[in-house]
Image (cartoon, coloured by chain):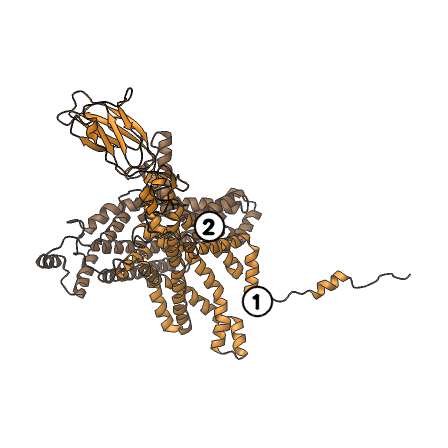
Chain colours: A brown, B orange
Amino acid sequence: MANSRTNKYAYVRYAVIRLIQGAITVWLIATATFFAMHNVPGDPLMDEKAVSPEIRKNLQAKYGLDRPLLEQYGIYLSNMIRGDFGISYAQENRSVNDIIREHFPVSAILGVLSIVFAALGGILFGALTAINRNRLPDIVIMFLVIMGISVPSFVFAALGQMTLVNVNAFLGVSILPVAGWGSVSHMIMPSLILGLGTMAFLTRLMRSSMLEIDNADYLRTAISKGLPPTRIFLRHQLRNAILPVITVLGPSIAAITTGGFVVELVFAIPGLGRYFVQAVQQSDYTVIMGTTVFYGAFLVLMVIVVDLLYGLVDPRVRLD
Amino acid sequence: MEASFSFERTDTIARALTTTRPSLTYWQDAWRRFKANPRSLISLYIVVTIGLFTLVGPWVWTINPMLQDLDQISVPPGADRRARVVEPHVRWPTTETNNRTPWTMSTTQLAVIGEATTQAIRLAWNPVAGASGYRLYRGIAEPTSPDALGLPLADIVNAKTTGFEDRLDLKPRTYFYSVVALSSEGFELREHSTLAVEVTRVITANEAIARGLSERDGPSLIGETVYLDFHPLGTDYLGRDMLARLMHGARVSLFIGIVAPFLYVLVGILYGSIAGFAAGRWDQLLMRFADFVVALPFLLFMILFKMIFNTEPGESGIFAMLLAMILLSWPAMARLVRGQILQIREEAYIGASRLLGAGSMYLILRHMIPNTMGVILVTLTFAVPGAIFTEAFLSFIGMGVAPPNPSWGSMCNEGIKTMLTAPHELVFPAVFISLTVLVFNLLGDGLRDALDTRMRSD
């Protein structure tokens, strides 16, 4: 192709523009978080223990809370650019960076497993329902999908845990641990549960996407050429139907990240989501700000990555 | 040859020609399509039922959702409510048991004296040679090993005392009491003796009258059976009526679930139509801002805003949640409305109407609004499950409605702690959330199919 180089150029340009837009969004998120947190009633040094005004002053000086708001904002931003999110108020001497470094990998493993599970299941079941349209597998799976969309994740989590407890008690051996983290067996149940809602959503999307291309010309051509059905299914139907599913992977990652809060709480998994919820409950301001900005940046990046991936997978997509 | 065809008009054809149906309006047509779909119709009935449950329910079932029934804690639906009326409690002088063994204890070492009731359980045992005291355990499951006897109930440091009266928070159930002799150093000696005790529920006459369980007065009641308060769906871990809490919780969950989408859709319509009409640079600017709000991580900022707006500690937090949800959710609606307006503006019928002399007010009222109404209504219906989920999520992680106000999400949060022993506390609110979300999803599907054929799924 003559214009493949210009295409490549356009793609890089698009990627750079998207990254710059993403950086601006993250900056806005950081700013919004900073001013939001400084408008929260009460202050982080207000504790059950009464402190004398002098100690209070020292504490404020230590955390830089006695400076003007704009100066604090400047310090906050410059620290953040250097990748320093500050020190936790609630857990003395523990930096927010440490908390993120230690607990984000756990959340990430859980999230990646769930998204893989959700995507594979969604594509598989979606294709299955579309092929068997209005027959028994379609009706059964679509019923389950509606259930999956309607039941909140914490109910799934609780039901999953309850099932494990009962199954383990019935069999007398622990086939899967009920809670906790550490080994592969710990990961199976929580990631299945976390992926369920997204899987239901993706199944529905995959089904309508498969049905949409049912009367496509290229499909009719393939059939009239006499290609074997498996080849038609894999090369023509599946490949084209997957495209819309990829676009929603970005928002799905967001859904799974926040869904992870609940699953981590219920299954006692030491992930970042659980720390975020704890920080909120303890009004641990630096941790809240740090994790919010971190999560915000992560989600913005994921959406960009998914969009760029989409541009690679589908050359028809317009880059603008 | 003469043809014998007769071209007489038959009756049926004549009727068919005259019965042309009257033309239907858009909404009549939509309603006709909606009615034809049994799934949408059933979901509409369920939505109405849930609405009645929420609005009329508390007038029918007037129990206070914050009132505690301490005799019935974590009681499942349909539990035994009988209680026998007894005399007030009199202290049992355990010294009576000192060094004497008047009790007939042939096989078991541990025995119940008198009747085991929720008022008191009197235990006695045979003295153990060489013991300097005894330790009493109470468990709720049969002990499987000497290390798992339950919770230590009492240490009796006097070797002569071989009796104990347990009055600690007794429930009508089976308890497993174990007694272990203690050496002079305070160590446990030899094997334990365990006894299963079935406890019957009793209530004093004064209490029964004070709580209005019986109309008859004092002494004549003794020995009679009264029924404790009725809880059709059981009680929660604090003894509060589940049905009443579900009804009041529905008010919170559905209020947020319906009012929040309604308000942010309204804001979105205003914003979107301003952007749509303004066009040009202002449109660009307004939509850029909307894009930025969309990019905010929704639930994280829900939590942040919830913290900002929650000024008073005693507040329920419903208003804060509502405000946060409106602030974060309007852009999607604004985008939708703007897109619709830009699209409709170019439609031929708008041009035709304008040619016929229609003013902009007429265009907006007569063409723009009715033509966007369908899309807006469908989006609104699909927004309800999202808002209910958000409320449930926030309440579940403890950032939602402040206790003791019930909401379905916070009830799930409380229920999950006792799900193994009292599953009904989790199951009921979870079923209500799921059913409501399911029904609104189906209703949205039905509305979409009925109102707008272009959006129809498959």
Q: Which mark is residue B25?
A: 1
Amino acid type of disc 2?
Arg
* Classed neighbour count for the residue bearing mark 1: other residues with Cα under 10 Å, few (<14), some (14–19), many (≥20): few
Query: What secondary structure is marked by label 2?
Result: helix
The residue positioned 29% from the left and 37% from the top of the image is B119
Q: Pick the quarter of the image with the N terminus of chain B.
A: bottom right
Q: Residue at the far bottom: name it.
A: B357
Q: Which residue is mark 2?
A: A204
Direction from residue B139 to residue A129 in the image, left or right = right
Q: Which mark is residue A67?
A: none
Question: Could you say where residue B169 lies in the image, as x and y percent from the top left?
Answer: 27, 39
Direction from residue A38 to residue B224 in the image, left or right = right
Question: Could you say where residue A230 lies in the image, as x and y percent from the top left?
Answer: 51, 42
Q: Is residue A192 visible?
A: no
Question: Could you say where residue A298 lies in the image, as x and y percent from the top left?
Answer: 29, 53
Query: What secondary structure is marked by label 1?
Result: loop
Q: Residue at the far right: name it.
A: B1
Chain letter of the residue beneath label 1 in the structure image:
B
Q: Is residue B285 visible?
A: yes
Chain letter of the residue beneath label 2 in the structure image:
A
Foreground of the two, B14 or A218: B14
Q: CA distance from mark 1 to mark 2?
A: 33 Å
Question: Could you say where residue A244 lies in the image, as x and y percent from the top left?
Answer: 44, 53
Amino acid type of disc 1?
Thr
Determine contact: label 1, label 2, CB under 8 Å: no
